[in-house]
Each structure stands twice: as structure tokens, then as C-alpha cells.
Image: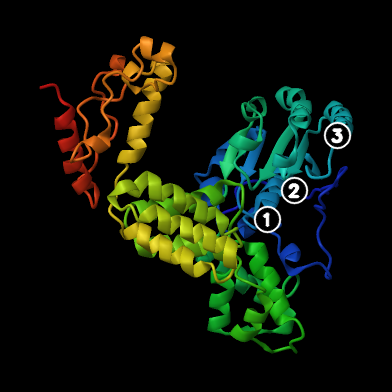
Amino acid sequence: MEELFPSPDQRLEPGPAAVSTSRPGPDSPLAARLRPAEWQEVLGQSSLIGPAGALRDATLGGNLPSMVLVGAPGTGKTTIAQLLARSQSAHLVAMSAVSAGVGDIRKVVAEAAVRRRAGQRTVLFLDEIHHFSRTQQDALLPHVESGLLTLIGATTENPSYQLTGALLSRVQVYDLQPLAEEDLGQLLDRALADEERGLGRQHLGLDSAGRELLVSRSGGDARAMLNALERAAGGLAPGGLVTAESVRRALAGPHLLHDRAGDLHYQILSAFIKSMRGSDPDAAIYWLARLLEAGEEPSVPARRMVILAAEDVGLADPGALPLAVAAQQAVLLVGMPECRLPLTEAAVYLALAPKSNAVYRAYTAASADVTTHLSLPVPLHLRNAVTARDREHGFGQGYQYAHDDPEGLVGHGHLPPELGDRRYYVPSEHGEEARLRDLLERIRVRRSPK
């Protein structure tokens, strides 16, 4: 990649609650040794650091803005922060928001004021910034706003949920993407060839199946892939071959990109639900497997299927809800891994079931009337005449007992008169609701005024 920014030598000194930014030694993990030291070594993220990248414009003329870098693990957030600070000849203080406190921020601010008088700016790299509380974020605000600190935050979470509006308004937000397979392949080649920082002195080979496993199972996480390569190569003699089998042993399990509370959690759940709603059983099975194999609690997709059975299938297939509830109960009864099968069965059934959201629309319309009209009185003919006083006031008069009619139908309505002949439930023409539509029309004809 073309070098975008000047890179003068600079010592990156760790601050309180520090994240180390010094060059790793020979005993450091392979991923740490191969961390890019120059822009041209950075793979991927061309939309940010390429010739037309947003960060190229942001740093021209030395005007580095405060920012938050958002991305999955192993996408280069720390590396880019270090290179940005170095490109500006700034003093970099790197901290972890997990362990840093307001006292640490005060110390950094005091030292930054001294450096400013000496003509040097301070960049504060705050890893895992989403762990900072509102109070801690507020402590940063005046110093970010005044320019005393240039903040570079890093997070795997959606900053719109985790950061205060005041802090967000003072930073630029940049999204980093997982590394593509081509980028990961280049990184593997670099790791095997680099004699100074990589495994080049061992002259190791890597068979094609092992290479494919490392790339495909990394989930776009460069750090995870290099750690697996290092484990797979451990103990090999010079000139040895890293095989698919050794890679498989090094990969304790699939490295699936997933979180249980962040954006990706909800994105995969959304894809799962929409696949069933869209009658795509294959996609529904895939997204269900993505959830379960990543360690998601099986009760999570089970609950969503119960909701979908009522909301998106409804009475078009009255068997959908009992089946979804049965799958949820199976999760409680047998647990993982066996509950994967009833969950899959339910997902396929719901995907192929006829669809109707008539029940959902009916309740939504009824609830709107309830909140609009508040407490309409119960019609007199629907009130129980328990006492003599009730009967004097006309309670129960005109009420028709459905079982007295051969068809079980009555000629009066049951809504408050103020709502007239309001219709909330409008069946679709799908599945069982087509029959219900005809039945409901007969009922409504019977109730119509003669």
C-alpha cells in the first residue's frame, strides 16, 4: 500500500493503565511481532487509509481530529492509532478503559498541558472506550473540545449506544471491516517469510488445506489467525510443514465472529428471523447454526421463534405456535447439543408455514383505540347482573347466549358503542386464515342490522 503519511521515529510511551506500544521482543507472540510499523504494511481498510481514504484527508496539514475506531477484534484499530500518532509527531499515551479511571485522565491532562507549552500535542489512545462510564466520558469532554487531548478511542461496540451524545458530537467515527481472505493470505505469506519478525528463519511450509483452514476459520481476525499459525508451527523442526491437521489442533474451535450483546448479535438474530419470515428454510438453518456454534444461548433463538410464530404466521397455521413453544421447552429439557435438532425442526416449519401478520395488526389497532379513547364503559348488555341494583340499571338486558343458537352465533356486538363496528382482525387469504375469513364474514353478517 502507498505510504500516506510521514513516519518519523518516535518513542510511544505507555501511560497509566497502559497498553504497551513499544516494539515487541523476539519472545513476544507472532501477532505482536508482525504488527505493522509503517502504513504500507497495513492490510485492508483502504476506504480509511487508501489514497482516497477518510483518514488521509483527516490528517493532511497535521489536523488530526479526535475519533473513535469501530471494528471487530484483529482489524487493526490499535495499529492505526499508533501510526496516526506517529505521523503527527505527537506524544502517544495508550490506556485501557477497562482499568483506567478519572484519576488517570487527570494525570494525562496535566502532562498534556506541559507538553502543549513545549509545542508537542498529546494523543490519548483509549482502548475499549465503551467501558468508560458517563462520568469518565464527561471528564474527557473539555480537554477533547479544547484540543489539549486528541482522543482516539477503539471499540468493538456500537458507539451510538455506548458513548454519550456529548462525546460523540466531538469525535469522528470510522468503521473498520474484517480483513478479506486475500488480505489474510498476504499476512500468512509475510509471517512465513519475514526472518526478523516472523517465522522466516525456520523456513516452514504451509500446505494448501492448512492455509485454507487458517484463513476461513479466522473470521477476518488477523490476530486470531497468526496466533493459530504460531501454535500449529510450534515444535516443528526447521524446514517442517504446517499441515491441515496441525492447524486443526491449533484451532480449539471455530473462530466465529459474534457477540452476545452488541451489533453482530442483533444482526444475526435479525437475519435468522427475516429468513423464516421470508420462507427461506436454508438461510434460517444457516443463521441458527451461526448463533449456536458461536456459543449463543439456545434459549435466545427459541424465544424469537415463539414470537415469530404468533407475529408472522399467526392463525394462517395454528400449529406454528405450539410447535415453537415445544421447541423452547425442548431447549430447557435436553439442552445443548441435542436441542439443536428441535430448534432446527421449528425453524424449518416456521419458514415453510403460510404467513400472516393479521393477529399482530389486530392487536396494534386495538391498542391504538384503547390509548385514544382511554376507559370506555362496558356496554350494559355485557355486564353481569349480580345484584338487584344491577338489574335496575339494565345490566345484562339484551344479552344473547351463544349456546342457545344452533350455529352458536349472536346478533349483537360486543364493542363499546363509541367504536361502532370497528374491525381489528382482518384475516389473510393464506393457509387456515382463508377458512377463518369466510367464517368471520358469516359472523359479521349475522350481527349486521336487519
The residue identified by callout 2 is 8
Q: CA distance from mark 2 to mark 3?
A: 23 Å
Q: Is residue 271 visible?
A: no
Residue type, label 1: Glu
Say which residue label 1 marks.
Answer: 38
Q: Is residue 230 left or right of residue 111?
A: left
Q: Which mark is on residue 108?
A: 3
Return the residue found at the far front.
388
Residue 298 x %, y %: 56, 59
Locate residue 376 relative to residue 88 in the image: left or right. Answer: left
Give the x, y percent position of residue 5. Answer: 64, 46
The image shows residue 25, relative to residue 176, as above or below, that is below
All told, the count of numbered labels is: 3
Bin the neighbour count of mark 2 within 10 Å (Cα to Cα): few under 14, some 14-19, many 20 and up. Answer: few
**SS at badge 1:** loop
Quarter assignment of residue 173: top right
What's the distance in space between the residues labelled 1 and 2, CA to CA?
A: 10 Å
